């Protein structure tokens, strides 16, 4: 895969943005291998994602970055420019269930996910062997033998040390404190089951089973202070029938969960996901 | 299609039901072309659906029916035996939107749905021409120029006269009075949009759009006094993205709605759907 | 829906194309509501689709068009610029089966498809009533009582008179002569069933049934001289099982066919489909 | 999960089969938790799958088996009766690619697949560590440094020793000799990519990419002497677009392959799959 600079821009829509950006890139001999735009008619916000071949540019990354900052100011842009060679640091957080964690680890090991998985933080010990076999440090935090606040402080301490670019809640099953949600805003990705209609409260699979739903699904989203209400990265469903027991539905739900989490994580790692209020723009 | 008797049974599960039923059929030379069972482990309820070639039987439908009633009593069965040559009488109820109505009419006309559509009852006039072109009576009920209670009484009167086996709410958009729900219990089929998560109240598509969902769906269900909470016949979804406007989502939602309604209706017409509490058993 | 100019461009990829085009648009105060690019790495070909709000431009369509032609020359572009207010003229061609035709007619009538359906040409009479009810002329061509070459000449004559922008083979079931394929290159859209694996020759559904496939599908594609081998616009599948007879598979296949044809046609009508050799780029 | 006897029957269809079988079971106090029938109208063949609670029976497995054999003779049945407590012995065969193997191992380890994985036979060494970590023996067979016939003889020797009930070709990439296909007829499960249309010969993904397909898929099937032409257990597809490179298509194809293989294997392990000529009956 060729090294690219991924230029991600969001700003108030007006005439001339694309012209200015593309002229800027062309002036530096930059070859755009991909570019996508989206103008939100409701909010008047403009979104842009482009990939520029690093080798084609006649300037260095630092020069490109510094020079673009001026242009960005002019259009009041929120922006970032990520070097595809700089792998994002990912921390996975897990509880007892292995399906999402095992799936991400296998995809990562086989080269599907362009990132460094720097650690797993978990509130159970049962996944340690699998994680350490992948030569990834495993940090167990005790959520049962001590106050949750203490445990959460230990989580926060670990995260501070690890300084991740992305935190994946791979069926973490603990509520992330508001302070952490804010500190890592736009960097925490969660997966949870979803149904039509949704079933609030405990035992959603039991409720879905009792209601005889014909689809079970999963939603991958960014974590905000409203927990499961954050911007959606991806969703999918799988068909079930009266022949499926509640356990079957849980099993099938796991399949959807790991598939959707992998897709959402991939979009984030490739800088294809942009947050707009409580929504996302996914340039696939 | 060969003429069959469709034997639909539900009773408390115990040893010997299948043996008794299948011996009963075999004693009358009946050839079962299809048979399905389901035992609900939670409730201990047994469900059976079988189709018997009418020509293979050495008794008439009436004899079969009368004789089976004795057996049914012994096992405390709720049951019915439908002759595939007796087409169900269907009344379609519509409002302004044409997509579900047009879809059902076309499927019916091209021989896909084995039923008689005896009338359309609608609270708008705009679909009259399409319906009458199909040579189906169109009954307009005015829900704007008179009290809803009056309009509903007219609906009830029409239905009493038509005496339908099935009522399809093809985007009917009016609340069905409780008395009608009870009178036609297990005979009214509705279609409504569905999302993950569900969005309660007015303007669900706007809410789904604002939330940036990646799937929109539809649920086909039996109507109970709890309105949209009845036993689910079928569900499906379609993928959307940030590029889809609210109007696109509505348009794509229509595609799902008519597909899901057609499948649910078909299951009901073929006697493949059984209601169990607030769930369905669908023998497909 | 606001009036837009849809600028569709394909040219050899090099630095500066986007800059030149977007500067051209910005210089004329043009507001791009949407823009998509695709660079094919294998062939070095660049593709661009953008929509510009007509009202935002300080030049007329004719001025825009004439002035852009100069720029297009410089980059060796194949291009077109379509006014969203100029509805494409569509001719539907059908045989005996009604499902695709009825679907397109209903979508068109309910405002989903932005085009003028100027005629239906068919080699059976059975769909005349449905078509004429929609106030669309129905041209019957006799393919049984006369030589195919004669019939095809009549088809060609009709098409010449109608001068369509798009020809939709809605289960037309006749081989389109090479001369017509060439004359309307990139303008004829076909739908046909598809399986995994494909079944060549007569009776594909029987073969698929005999092989026990678990999916049946459909492919919508542009017609080339290689018949069913043209660039693919869209594909989809539906699940089947051993419980489905061959007739069930045909019926389910119809559902997929009309869905896929409608999507493919829509992409074409909205100028979102570009042909590249034997492939398509679909900017959805 | 309660212990059940799974009774699998296939015989020429005639009146009285179900009655005889269900009476036989009822006479022994057997409680059927599930039962499915299928009568193939074309071939006149009858298929039956039922599960009987072991604890409900007043006879032992051996008595049940011996006594049923008499009944089976009477109806000319091909049949088997599997004890759900007797786990099938599975041998996995792999090459270089890890995705299917890792998926099966994880599902097995987390209790999703009710079987004993007794060995992995592979023609590369790269998957050894992963397999041995799961405490499963890994047998490397050299297909490069020696004649294929010699290597295949070693495979056959290993299989003879292992005596598996099921052999899963988890992207094995070697042609299974005809003698092995015959010896393990109905016991070898393969997964391979599938497209619409199919692309014969080398480099199918390249061909699918060049053709611009919008779906890539996978087929799980029993291996017969006609290689990839055996009875289909399951199929599925995933959507791709012009934005997906050939490598993306391969990656997405892997996701489908492992999902479909897992489903097909599960159906086989649960005795839900029956072979009928070149088709399957899957009682899900």
Image (spheres, coloured by chain):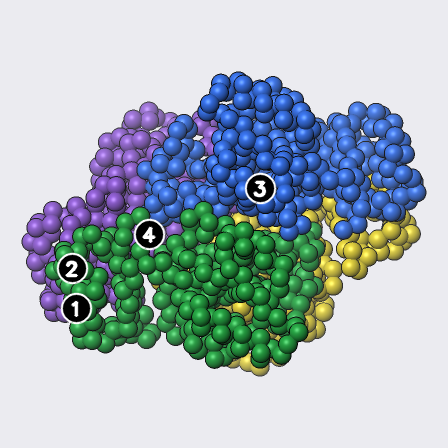
Chain colours: A blue, B purple, C yellow, D green
Q: What is the count of numbered marks?
A: 4
- Residue visible at 17% across and 56% down? D57
> What is the CA distance from the residue labelled 2 to the residue labelled 3?
48 Å
Along the viewing direction, whichever of A44 and A266 lies nearer the viewer:
A266
Q: Chain of mark 2?
A: D
Q: Nearer the viewer, mark 4 or mark 3?
A: 3
The local crowd at label 1, few if under 14, some if 14 to 19, many if 20 or more residues have their Cα within 10 Å, is few
User: Which structural element holds mark 4?
Assistant: helix
Q: Chain of mark 4?
A: B
Q: Are marks 2 and 4 in contact (CB under 8 Å)?
A: no
- Residue C270 shown left or right of residue D265 in the figure: right
User: Which structural element holds mark 2?
Assistant: loop
Q: Chain of mark 3?
A: A
Residue C102 at x, y percent in the picture: 49, 56
Q: Which mark is residue B267?
A: 4
- Residue visible at 27% across and 64% down? D81
- Residue visible at 30% across and 44% down? B280
Q: Which mark is residue D59?
A: 2
Which residue is labeled 1 in the image? D67
């Amino acid at each position: 895969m060729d090294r690219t600079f991924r230029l991600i821009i969001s700003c108030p829509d007006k005439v001339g943005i694309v012209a200015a950006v593309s002229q800027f890139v062309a002036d530096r001999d930059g070859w755009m291998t991909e570019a996508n735009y989206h103008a939100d008619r409701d909010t008047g916000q403009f979104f842009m994602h482009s990939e520029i071949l690093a080798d084609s540019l006649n300037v260095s990354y630092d020069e490109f970055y510094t020079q673009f900052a001026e242009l960005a100011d002019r259009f009041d842009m929120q922006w970032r420019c990520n070097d595809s060679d700089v792998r994002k640091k990912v921390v996975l957080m897990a509880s007892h269930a292995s399906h999402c964690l095992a799936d991400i680890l296998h995809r990562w090991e086989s080269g599907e996910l362009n990132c460094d998985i720097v650690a797993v933080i978990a509130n159970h010990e049962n996944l340690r062997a699998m994680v350490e076999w992948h030569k990834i440090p495993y940090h167990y935090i005790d959520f049962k033998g001590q106050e949750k606040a203490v445990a959460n402080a230990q989580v926060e301490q670990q995260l501070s040390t690890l300084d991740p670019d992305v935190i994946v809640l791979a069926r973490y099953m603990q509520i992330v404190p508001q302070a952490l949600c804010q500190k890592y805003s736009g960097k925490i990705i969660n997966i949870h089951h979803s149904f039509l209609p949704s079933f609030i409260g405990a035992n959603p699979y039991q409720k879905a089973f009792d209601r005889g739903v014909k689809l079970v699904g999963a939603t991958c989203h960014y974590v905000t202070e409203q927990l499961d209400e954050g911007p959606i990265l991806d969703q999918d469903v799988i068909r079930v029938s009266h022949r499926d027991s509640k356990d079957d539905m849980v099993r099938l739900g796991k399949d959807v969960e790991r598939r959707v989490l992998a897709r959402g994580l991939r979009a984030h790692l490739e800088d294809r996901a942009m947050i707009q209020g409580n929504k996302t723009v996914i340039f696939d």
